[in-house]
Amino acid sequence: MMPFNKDKIQIGISSCLLGEKVRYDGGHKNSKYCSRDLSELFKFVPVCPEMAIGLGTPRKTIRLVRDENQIRVLTSDESFDVTEPLVNFSNEKVKQLSALGGYIFCAKSPTCGMERVLEYKIGTNNATKSGVGIFAKALMERYPLLPVEEEGRLHDPNLKENFFTRVYAYHDWMSMKQTGLTRHELIRFHSRYKYLIMAHSTEWYRKLGPILADLSDLESRANEYFDGFMTALKCSATKRSHTNTLQHIQGYFKNELNKEQKAELTESILNFNQGLTPLLVPITLINHYLREHPKEYIQDQVYLNPHPQELKLRYGF
């Protein structure tokens, strides 16, 4: 069992994305973004299910095949069935990955694709993009709240920010659980994340507070809360929802800022809302005013710093 690392988030990843020569043709799908840009921030845990069950490289390609009501994994000529060893490996391997903070999959893979994997009708070359990789499915079913994404989708700035926002929030929750769940820490956790939740889902913003009203069964309530919390963060934040959140935070400065400063912050938020500047601009200005006029409740808001600056996010809006 992999130990939890509080200091450095562990992210599972398809081995081929790190340049390991594990593909059927002896090649790889090295992602410079992962192997170069992310490697300093995260501890990668590479997995290649096909190599793990001894298929070796080079090898025949495998694919998902629908045989009546079951999914099998066969070589492309359907001469060899590797369903059982892949399923057994996947089910056992995912049990060891409870300490992960996220997972980055290789797209379209019959083992690691998280969606839209080709699924063939047995005995034909007719396929639909309706499959999920065997290992990816096992992981997502065992850890339904774990942040997962496909490497190619991380080139979309908004999808990338959403993924890493969830990764850091998930890790924060796991760290809290490691030190011991208490009513005080659970309420404090929610307090710190209020504005991030608001930016992602006003519906869940209204729902999550009442869940914590009765903590007589702490473990059950915490699990219910975390389920809703991660569901909220999976919702895409929009310019409109960010603007609403920024304006709420702006209200805390109404008695501290002078007329010119209030106008500057208002203009910064409106420029963001109109697409003239990225989200980073009003966030930076708010953090600047917080240094001049400290407000503990706002300073503690994860919304203002949900991930390290090194990730270079919040430029996509």
Image: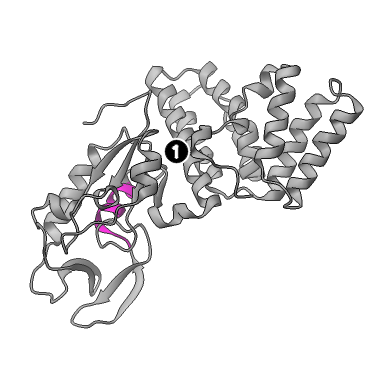
Q: Amino acid at mark 1?
A: Val
Q: Is residue 33 above or below residue 4?
A: below
> Predominant secondary structure in magenta?
helix
**Is 66 included in the stretch rendered in magenta?**
no
Whether residue 213 is visible = no
Asked if the stretch drawn in magenta spans residue 135, the answer is: yes
**Percent position of residue 204, x then y:** 61, 42
Q: Residue 243, position in %: x, y?
A: 73, 43
In the image, what residue occupies the spot 63% across and 31% down? Answer: 304
Say which residue label 1 marks.
167
Magenta residues (range): 132-141
- Given residues 172 and 159, the one toward you in this image is 159
Around disc 1, counting alpha carbons within 10 Å, would you say few (fewer than 14), some (14 to 19), or many (20 or more)? many
Residue located 21% across and 31% down the image: 1
Residue toward you, 303 or 135:
303
Residue located 47% across and 45% down the image: 163
Where residue 27 appears, as percent x and y from the top left, is: 20, 59
Residue 37 higher or lower than 308, as above or below: below
Q: Which image quadrant is residue 7 in?
A: top left
Q: Report whether 7 appears left or right of 65.
A: right
Q: Secondary structure at mark 1?
A: helix
Percent position (x, y) of residue 293? Answer: 76, 17
Foreground residue, 218 or 233?
Answer: 233
Image quadrant in which you'd find residue 23:
bottom left
Number of numbered markers = 1
For the view shown, which residue lies furthest in the right direction?
259
Which colour assignment does the render follow?
one colour
Say if residue 211 shows up in the picture: yes
**Residue at the (14%, 53%) spot, across then down:** 51
| 60 vs 31: above or below | below
